[in-house]
Image: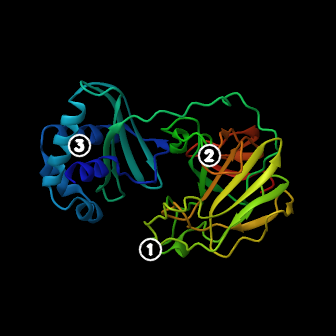
Amino acid sequence: MLIRRLASLLLAFLLIQPAQARPDADLATGRQLTEDFRQGRYDRIWERRTADMHAALGSVATLGEVARYVESRFGTERTVTSEQAREYLGYHYYSRVSDYDRASLPMVTQWTIDRDGRIAGFYIRPRQEAAASSFLDYETRADLRLPFTGHWYVTWGGRTPEDNYHAIDKGQRFAYDFLIAHDDSSHRGKGAAPEDYYCWDQPILAAAPGTVVRVVDGLPDNPIGTMDAKNPGGNHVVMDLGQSEYAFFAHMRKGSITVREGQSVAVGQEIGRCGNSGNSSEPHLHFHLQTTPDLGNGEGLPAAFRHYTADGEPVAKGEPLRGQIVAPDRD
């Protein structure tokens, strides 16, 4: 039980991930926290933890248990091969990649610091590898357009696990997560309810002409911070775009899907509304292409969109990247 608990704590981390580079001060903070952890100065770390992190860990002694588990499983850190500090919607992140003397893969250490300077997240784990793909040079055949109007933030997008955690999954190898942010926040106030999030109930549009091959609706939207792992896609639509390209639109609001299976849909047609169903802890849109209409059975395909802006710059055709603000060029 202890090993399972420690493994869970070791691998647990915030779903919100970094985007833009930060000053050297954040590097110094991350280095100091890592050194405190390595040297057993757990009280210093505990004092900076958020209330949620205190509740999750229980007591300062748990930090020592995690440290002993890491050492027994992976050994000790020998060489730091890279490090970076980034910021996303008011959260600061420090991460480093290191070689450990008994680890077969490089190890990643990450600290998450909130707006008040409190530690909101921490993990040490083996570095994840991107799934093998035979489609790295694939050219998207459908004339894809962004599946929304207005400006949305790319929370996950890119081809490496650092930029896109989906990349470790064969079927979602090139997937995206999108949300809306204002003033360094994805929500109003404390964001306690799905309705507080700016992307909640926003129209989700067909990214290309196609035929609806699967509709799932009726699943509840999750309370913030909880997820439905048994129904990972939540309320979702799968469209056949032709030429063996299938588009997935996931986590839509319960009861909002406006299309039916077998229906032909035009590009830009509303198919549902953004929600928080399925394996989602806060409202957002998940989108990806793959070779089959079955989640978990097929290979992911690069999804290059046409005619949009990224951070205000026009893009004729491209793959949005984590941290960019994107919008259809018609906006």
Q: Residues within 10 Å of mark 3 (few under 14, many from 20)?
A: some
* Circle 3 residue: 33
Tell me, for residue 8, which label it has, or none.
none
Contact, mark 1 vs mark 3 (Cβ under 8 Å): no
Check disc 2 and give the amino acid type.
Ala
Q: Is residue 80 left or right of residue 300?
A: left
* Circle 1 residue: 192
Check disc 3 and give the amino acid type.
Leu
Given residues 14 and 47, the one toward you in this image is 14
User: SS of the residue at dot 2?
Assistant: loop
Q: From the image, state whether disc 2 or disc 1 is nearer to you.
A: 2
Examine the image and state in which quarter residue 29 appears. Answer: top left
Examine the image and state in which quarter residue 104 appears. Answer: top left
Q: Is residue 243 left or right of residue 15?
A: right
Given residues 299 and 272, the one toward you in this image is 299
Q: Earlier in the sequence, mark 3 or mark 2?
A: 3
